[in-house]
Amino acid sequence: MGESILRSKGRITIRDVATATGHAVSTVSNALSGKPHVNEETRRQVKEAAERLGYRPSAVARSLRLKLSSTIGVLVSDVSNPAIPEFIRGIDDVAVREGCTIFLCNTDELIERQISQMETLLDRQVDGMILISQHCDEPEIRKLLDGKTPFVLIQRRSARYRDDYVGSDNIQGTRDSVTYLRQLGHRRIGLITGPLSSSTAQERLEVFETTSAELGCEQDPELIFRGDYTVEAGYRGMHYFASLPQRPTAIIASNDVCALGVQDAASELRLSIPKDISLLGCDDIDLARLRQINLSTLRLPKREMGAAAAELLIRRIRSKRNITPREIIIPTQLILRESCAPLDTRSTAEVRKAAPQPSDS
């Protein structure tokens, strides 16, 4: 059969390459997959014919042969959160390098939707899953996680099980945030938490309370506002703090999106940031550096976390032996802009020099 006829009949298969070269299908397969026992001249003929015909290996056939789909499922709680793309970039950097494709699923922090999305990914036979700030202890979810499909958790670990986990250094990062505000002279510091069903939010709350006590900050339950990672939580939190007989002089927001809500409410209440109240975020999203926002924040290494999780997952997928679950903690960094101001006589520049440095842990 002529090559022009082969091209006209549709998708070129490995059998077509075999016909064009006169070699057996098994020989062509071995030549294209780089098997060492193939004659170099034969390998050259096969590769030239494959390129000339426009042959592309079938991913389906490859997955059947290797019993791997080369796909990774990624679950996120809110795809509209501007912090999420950096996690995905890190995962995709590694996935592309390793020849994998990712399926992205949004769960809206809803257990029922997370279960449905996980079932869909498992039905599609993904090789593994990465769960970014997802539920992981509920019985129905645990049943899905305890199957044969490897998974890695990011930024929310299990309270009951030991799993592969990648996260930021919440302990040192929260200490640095409180310490910085205390160095600015603030003693009455408010905290808007993330959802306390999250291990990350719970850990930050605990460290906030212990560090505040150690540094001589006011210990007042009214300084804790239970929120989440949304603009609405920041807006409600700022209105709550403003309603107190004595409002805080500084606020730590659950994340930068929440901090935007604080800024919006402060403007509505005719409070100036940082003149009337200092504000510190968490994440360092792109919006935080805009001049109109200029938010001081705790930078989380989101792209690095995504890449570390993908590398850990692929290692787990390809390993033929049991590997002890790993925990990878990546340092954070304070990014100082213009949303925090000192209460004492020191200049902002002097306080910045004294600010805590990123942790090495």
Image (cartoon, rainbow, N blue to C red):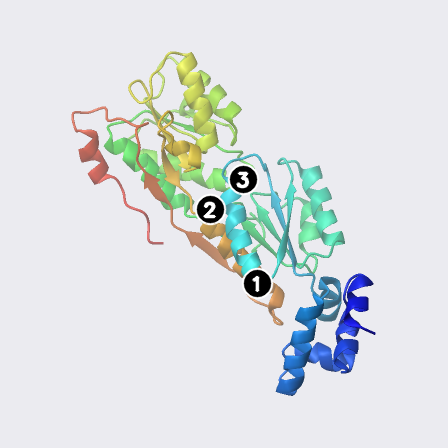
Task: Looking at the picture, tell me which residue is in the foreground, 72 or 333.
Answer: 72
Task: Tell me: residue 158, above or below residue 82.
Answer: below
| Coordinates of residue 235 in the picture (x, y in percent) | 48, 20
| Coordinates of residue 273 in the picture (x, y in percent) | 33, 21
- Give the residue at mark 3: 198
Task: Looking at the picture, tell me which residue is in the foreground, 94 or 190.
Answer: 94
- Give the residue at mark 2: 302
- Could you tell me which residue is drawn at 33 percent across and 53 percent down? 360
Q: CA distance from mark 2 to mark 1?
A: 20 Å
Q: Is residue 81 left or right of residue 291?
A: right
- Could you tell me which residue is drawn at 46 percent across and 46 percent down? 302
| Coordinates of residue 320 in the picture (x, y in percent) | 63, 72
Q: Judging from the image, what secondary structure is the residue with disc 3 in?
A: loop
Q: Are marks 1 and 3 in contact (CB under 8 Å)?
A: no
Q: How many marks?
A: 3
Q: Nearer the viewer, mark 3 or mark 2?
A: 2
